[in-house]
């Protein structure tokens, strides 16, 4: 009985020919631990796709300011030069200078005012303005310079964010006697955050 000789190249048959592996006999890939794999020996590597990270790169230019931080004056929502249709919503019919000595800008629809404008508001409206209504806006303070309104009888800043009564005695500095406080007949500051109502003592 003869025994097939083996060499460094692998086992050989009786005639010295090297044996070839049979069909379906392949070297199994090594397992992670170094031993044979159980079951299916096919290993598939899955590479996840790259995630779009552009939306995480939010610079200052991508941050929208809040409506209260935008600078918007009454004339920004009202057409100038006596025209019509320049404003938005309830203010589409208004114009500067306001006819009849009355400026009423309602912010329940369209753009909201965040600054009163002070002396520039007086210059645009005229010193003879008698009624000023800036209702339902985002005003945080009463700008100075309203002493230029020499005949203001009604001031309504209803539904804003005003924290203090200011500017009612602006006229004292130029001998105006505390305008517009001394000429007011109606002052409506409802739905604001005012804590001290002392300045209303100027009003008759």
Image (tube, grey):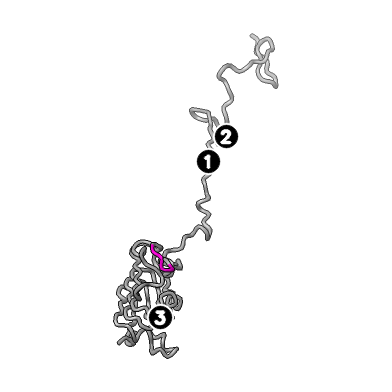
Q: Residues within 10 Å of mark 2 (few under 14, many from 20)?
A: few
Task: Choose top left, top right, bottom left or bottom right for residue 95.
Answer: bottom left
Residue 7 drawn in magenta: no
- At 32% from the left and 75% from the top, the residue drawn is 156
Label 2 residue SS: loop
* Labels 1, 3: front one: 3
Q: Tell me where residue 165 appears, x and y as whole percent.
A: 37, 80
Quadrant (top left/top right/bottom left/bottom right) for the C terminus = bottom left
Label 3 residue SS: loop
Residue 83 drawn in magenta: yes
Is there a contact, CB below 8 Å, between mark 2 and mark 1?
A: no
Is there a contact, CB below 8 Å, between mark 1 and mark 3?
A: no
Q: Which residue is mark 2?
A: 34
Is there a contact, CB below 8 Å, between mark 3 and mark 2?
A: no
Q: Tell me where residue 154 appears, x and y as whole percent.
A: 32, 78
| Residue range highlighted in magenta | 80-84
- At 29% from the left and 80% from the top, the residue drawn is 186
Dominant SS of magenta comes to: loop
User: Does 6 sit left or right of 72 as displayed?
Assistant: right
Q: Tell me where residue 181 appears, x and y as whole percent.
A: 35, 84
Task: Choose top left, top right, bottom left or bottom right for residue 32.
Answer: top right
Question: How far is the residue under mark 2 from the one under mark 1?
Answer: 29 Å
Which disc, if any, is residue 49?
Answer: 1
Label 1 residue SS: loop
Question: How far is the residue under mark 3 from the one under mark 2?
Answer: 94 Å
Q: Which residue is mark 3?
A: 127
Against 8, is 199 above or below? below
Q: Residues within 10 Å of mark 3 (few under 14, many from 20)?
A: some
- Whichever of labels 2 and 1 marks the residue nearer the N terminus, that label is 2
Task: Choose top left, top right, bottom left or bottom right for residue 83.
Answer: bottom left
């Amino acid at each position: 009985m003869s025994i097939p000789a083996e060499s460094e190249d692998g086992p050989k048959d009786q005639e010295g020919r090297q044996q070839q592996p049979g069909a379906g006999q392949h070297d199994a890939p090594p397992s992670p631990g170094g031993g044979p794999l159980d079951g299916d020996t096919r290993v598939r590597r899955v590479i996840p796709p790259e995630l779009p990270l552009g939306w995480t790169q939010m610079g200052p230019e991508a941050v929208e300011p809040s409506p209260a931080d935008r600078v918007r004056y009454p004339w920004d929502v009202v057409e100038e030069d006596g025209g019509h249709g320049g404003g938005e919503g309830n203010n589409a019919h208004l114009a500067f200078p306001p006819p009849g000595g009355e400026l009423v800008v309602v912010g329940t629809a369209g753009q909201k005012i965040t600054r009163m404008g002070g002396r520039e508001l007086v210059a645009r409206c005229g010193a003879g303005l008698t009624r000023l209504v800036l209702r339902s806006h985002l005003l945080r303070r009463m700008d100075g310079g309203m002493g230029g309104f020499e005949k203001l009888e009604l001031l309504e800043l209803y539904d804003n964010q005003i924290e203090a009564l200011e500017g009612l005695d602006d006229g004292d500095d130029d001998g105006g006697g505390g305008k517009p406080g001394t000429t007011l007949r109606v002052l409506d500051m409802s739905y604001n955050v005012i804590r001290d109502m002392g300045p209303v003592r100027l009003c008759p």
